[in-house]
C-alpha cells in the first residue's frame, strides 16, 4: 500500500476512531519516507511535512494524528543529526511504525480490561458514536461473561451508532437503537454512559462526536456516571501548548442529502464538540481510571508511552 492510498482511506472515512486513524497516520508517514527515492535531506523533510499537513487537514481534531506528525518529524531530525543514511532512515521509520501500532494495540487492550471491570453484570450501558475503545471494552465485558444491555444513539448524520450495535449484537448483548433526540429520555434508565474521545484537553474536557455533550448533560442531570474510554495519547499536544482544539465544519450535504435549501436557510454541520471535564466521572485509560483533573499531566509524565 502507498502513502496516498492510506490517506485516501482516511479521507473516505473508511478508517474511523481516533486510535485507528492515529495508527493509519503513522503508516502513511512511514510510507511517505519509504517511497522517497531522492538523496536530499531537505527534500525528504519537505515531503514528510507535506504528508503530515495533509493528514492534519483531513483530521484536524485528532490528537493521535498531531502526535504522529510530531513524532515523525522528531524521528527524521534525530536520524539526520546522527548522520544516518537514507536506507537507515527508512529502516528507522519502518520500525517506528511497527512499534507505534503495537503499543497502541497494547494500550487499548489494557484499557478495555479496566473498562470491563467498571461495567457490572446486568448493567445498561448507553453510548454515542463509534469508538474503538468502547468496542474493545464491550468485547472485554463479553470475555468476562457478563450480561449487559447496550443503548446507542443513531449518531447522525453518518449513523455510527448502527455499527456500535452491530458489534454489540455479535457479542450477544441485548441492544437498542434510539434517535439522538431521545438521549435524555433513555439515559435515566442506564447504569452508566460510556463514550470515546478524539482529543483530551489539559483541563479534563474532551472532544468527541457532536451529541456527546448532550448525553453528558443528561447523564449528569439524572445522576448517571459518564466514563470516557481513551488512551492517554489522546491528550492533545497542541492544547498543552495553549492552542484551542480544532473542531472544524463538515460538508452541508451530509445533512441536506438532496434537499433543496429554502431561501435564507443555512446549514451548520460541526461534527465534533467539546464536553466539560466536570461532567466526566473518570477517564478509563491504559493506566487505569484517571480523574478529569489529573488526565492532563499524563503526557508530561510520559504515561502515554
Image (cartoon, rainbow, N blue to C red):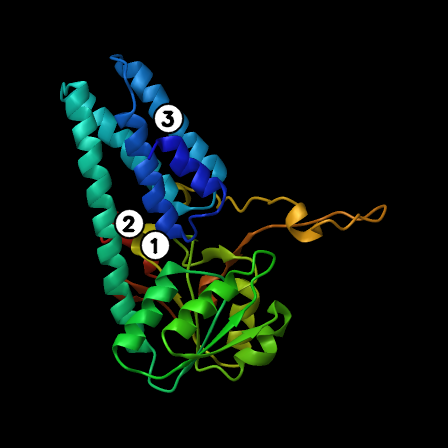
Among numbered discs 3 and 1, the one appearing first in the sequence = 3
- Residue 286 can be seen in this image: no
User: Measured from the top left, where is residue 83 in percent x and y?
Assistant: 14, 18
User: Measured from the top left, where is residue 181 in percent x and y?
Assistant: 64, 70
Asked where in the image residue 49 lies, by quadrant, the reply is top left
Q: Residue at x 60, y 50 (%)?
A: 270
**Camera-side mark, 2 or 3:** 3
Q: Are marks 2 and 1 in contact (CB under 8 Å)?
A: yes
Determine whether, in the image, residue 298 is placed left or right of residue 264.
Answer: left
Q: Which residue is drawn at 40% across and 79% down?
A: 173
**Camera-side mark, 3 or 1:** 3
Q: How crowded is mark 2: few (under 14 residues within 10 Å), some or many (20 or more)?
A: some
Name the residue that disc number 3 marks: 49
Name the residue that disc number 2 marks: 299
Name the residue that disc number 1 marks: 296
Of 112 and 159, the residue lying toward us = 159
Determine whether, in the image, residue 181 is placed left or right of residue 10.
Answer: right
Q: Residue furthest bottom?
A: 122
Amino acid at each position: 500500500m502507498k502513502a496516498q492510498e492510506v490517506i485516501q482511506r482516511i479521507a473516505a472515512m473508511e478508517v474511523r476512531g481516533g486510535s485507528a486513524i492515529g495508527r493509519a497516520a503513522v503508516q502513511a508517514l512511514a510510507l511517505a519516507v519509504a517511497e522517497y527515492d531522492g538523496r536530499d535531506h531537505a527534500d525528504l523533510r519537505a515531503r514528510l511535512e507535506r504528508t503530515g499537513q495533509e493528514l492534519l487537514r483531513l483530521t484536524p481534531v485528532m490528537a493521535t494524528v498531531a502526535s504522529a506528525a510530531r513524532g515523525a518529524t522528531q524521528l527524521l531530525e534525530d536520524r539526520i543529526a546522527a548522520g544516518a543514511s537514507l536506507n537507515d532512515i527508512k529502516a528507522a521509520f519502518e520500525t517506528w511504525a511497527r512499534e507505534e501500532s503495537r503499543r497502541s494495540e497494547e494500550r487499548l487492550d489494557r484499557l478495555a480490561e479496566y473498562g470491563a471491570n467498571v461495567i457490572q453484570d446486568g448493567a445498561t450501558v448507553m453510548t454515542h458514536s463509534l469508538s474503538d475503545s468502547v468496542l474493545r471494552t464491550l468485547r472485554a465485558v463479553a470475555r468476562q461473561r457478563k450480561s449487559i444491555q447496550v443503548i446507542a444513539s443513531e449518531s447522525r448524520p453518518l449513523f455510527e451508532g448502527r455499527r456500535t450495535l452491530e458489534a454489540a449484537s455479535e457479542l450477544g448483548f441485548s441492544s437498542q437503537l434510539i434517535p439522538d433526540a431521545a438521549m435524555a429520555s433513555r439515559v435515566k434508565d442506564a447504569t452508566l454512559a460510556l463514550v470515546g474521545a478524539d482529543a483530551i484537553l489539559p483541563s479534563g474536557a474532551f472532544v468527541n462526536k457532536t451529541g456527546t455533550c448532550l448525553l453528558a448533560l443528561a447523564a449528569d442531570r439524572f445522576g448517571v456516571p459518564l466514563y470516557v474510554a481513551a488512551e492517554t495519547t489522546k491528550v492533545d499536544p497542541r492544547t498543552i501548548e495553549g492552542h484551542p482544539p480544532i473542531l472544524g465544519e463538515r460538508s452541508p450535504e451530509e445533512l441536506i442529502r438532496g434537499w433543496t435549501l429554502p431561501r435564507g436557510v443555512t446549514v451548520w454541520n460541526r461534527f465534533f464538540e467539546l464536553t466539560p471535564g466536570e461532567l466526566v466521572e473518570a477517564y478509563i485509560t491504559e493506566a487505569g481510571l484517571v480523574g478529569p483533573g489529573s488526565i492532563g499531566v499524563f503526557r508530561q509524565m510520559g504515561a502515554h508511552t
